[in-house]
């Protein structure tokens, strides 16, 4: 199944459990989702490919709140609150030959130090998988979706896409590339998976508030799980990852560490004290992002320690 971006398949700036699915699949189905990014003020000049559906989305009108253009939601038949949606990221590909990076006053990790708005259009080369930087250097690309999430709890009503929360959303974790699996707790019937905020490349932290923002195509396999705790986790071929979000980075550190302890105890049968020791000796804490209101920390632990 392919879900194309467009005015009837995208929602801009919000998650909402009452939003009807644009497509429905059975658990275990592969689905390809195409996304776009940015408002009219982010468009490049002549000579670049702009997906026509981006113009159509702009023509429909700008949102009443800031946020991301997301494609979806895709419903998974039979999904119920309390389950976990295993989201296998099978492939992520570029859809255009440019991205943009923006600095906005009063935003980012240093909100009071950069008073001049800037917007750089960065050419992307799909053959070399590099971006040309304004100073002439080439930056390797590692595309991933900044936003992948399910519907939030229904009693939250409509919420912004900016803050990552218990539904996932704007996690901005650069480890979520092709070959990674993201586990998302289900909060509403159908799960209602959406994605967007395509990134060509991003550093841990995303400090200036944007990555290389671009249009991506993702191929996912969406599978319901009844045997996992309702927590946001991820799995690469080499590592387990626990992810935590909160306005306080200190709280994020505590939550990501605590969840890794739980994961180790369940997988390896160690005591909590032994698992805490293993986190200290072999777990790596990373600052996921510091710019989305709710900040992020993720801990990575090599799978070899759980064999």
Image (cartoon, grey):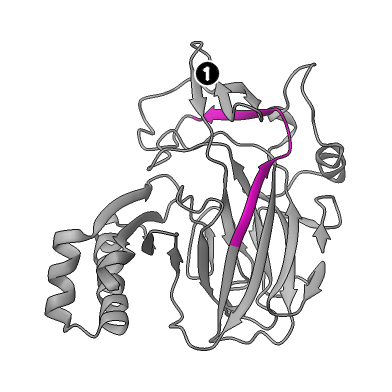
- 117 vs 2, left or right, is left
* Residue at x 71% of width, y 36% of height: 39
Q: Is residue 1 above or below residue 49?
A: below
Task: Pick whichever, 272 or 39, lies toward us.
Answer: 272
Q: Quadrant of the C terminus?
A: bottom left
Task: Pick whichever, 28 or 78, lies toward us.
Answer: 28
Q: Is residue 120 visible?
A: yes
Callout 1: helix, strand or loop? loop
Which quarter of the picture shows residue 158?
bottom right
Identify the residue under disc 1. Answer: 133
- 85 vs 58, left or right, is left
Residue 135 appears at what percent x and percent y?
48, 11
Residue 232 appears at what percent x and percent y?
45, 70
* Residue at x 33% of width, y 65% of height: 303
Q: How many marks?
A: 1
* Residue at x 31% of width, y 84% of height: 266
- 297 vs 127, left or right, is left
Residue 255 appears at what percent x and percent y?
29, 68
Residue 166 appears at what percent x and percent y?
48, 70
Q: Quadrant of the N terminus?
A: bottom right
The crowd level at tag 1 (other Cα within 10 Å; few <14, some 14-19, many 20+) is some
Q: Main secondary structure of the magenta part?
A: strand
Farthest residue, direction top? 136
Question: Was residue 93 drawn as part of the magenta stretch in this picture?
Answer: yes
Question: Was residue 306 drawn as part of the magenta stretch in this picture?
Answer: no
Q: Is residue 66 visible?
A: no
Q: Which residues are magenta?
A: 89-104
């Amino acid at each position: 199944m392919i879900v194309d971006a467009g005015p009837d398949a995208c929602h801009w700036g919000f998650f909402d459990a009452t939003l009807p699915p644009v497509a429905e699949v059975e658990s275990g189905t592969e689905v390809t989702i195409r996304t776009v990014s940015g408002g009219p003020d982010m468009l490049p000049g002549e000579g670049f490919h702009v997906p026509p559906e981006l113009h159509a989305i702009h023509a429909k009108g700008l949102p009443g709140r800031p946020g991301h253009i997301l494609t979806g939601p895709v419903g998974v038949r039979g999904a119920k609150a309390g389950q976990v949606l295993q989201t296998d990221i099978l492939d992520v590909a570029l859809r255009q030959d440019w991205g943009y990076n923006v600095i906005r006053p009063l935003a980012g990790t240093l909100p009071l130090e950069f008073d001049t708005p800037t917007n750089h259009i960065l050419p992307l080369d799909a053959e070399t998988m590099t971006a040309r930087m304004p100073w002439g250097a080439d930056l390797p690309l590692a595309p991933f979706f900044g936003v992948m999430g399910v519907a939030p709890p229904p009693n939250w009503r409509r919420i912004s896409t900016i803050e990552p929360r218990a539904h996932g959303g704007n996690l901005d974790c650069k480890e979520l590339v092709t070959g990674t699996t993201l586990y998302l707790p289900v909060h509403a019937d159908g799960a209602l998976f959406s994605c967007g905020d395509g990134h060509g490349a991003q550093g841990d932290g995303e400090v200036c508030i944007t990555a290389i923002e671009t249009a991506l195509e993702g191929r996912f396999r969406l599978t319901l799980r009844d045997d996992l705790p309702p927590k946001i986790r991820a799995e690469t071929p080499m590592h387990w990852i626990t992810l935590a979000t909160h306005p306080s980075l200190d709280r994020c550190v505590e939550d990501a560490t605590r969840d890794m302890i739980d994961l180790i105890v369940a997988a390896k049968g160690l005591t909590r004290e032994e698992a805490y020791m293993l986190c200290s000796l072999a777990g790596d804490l990373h600052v996921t992002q510091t710019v989305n209101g709710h900040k992020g920390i993720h801990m990575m632990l090599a799978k070899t320690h759980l064999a």
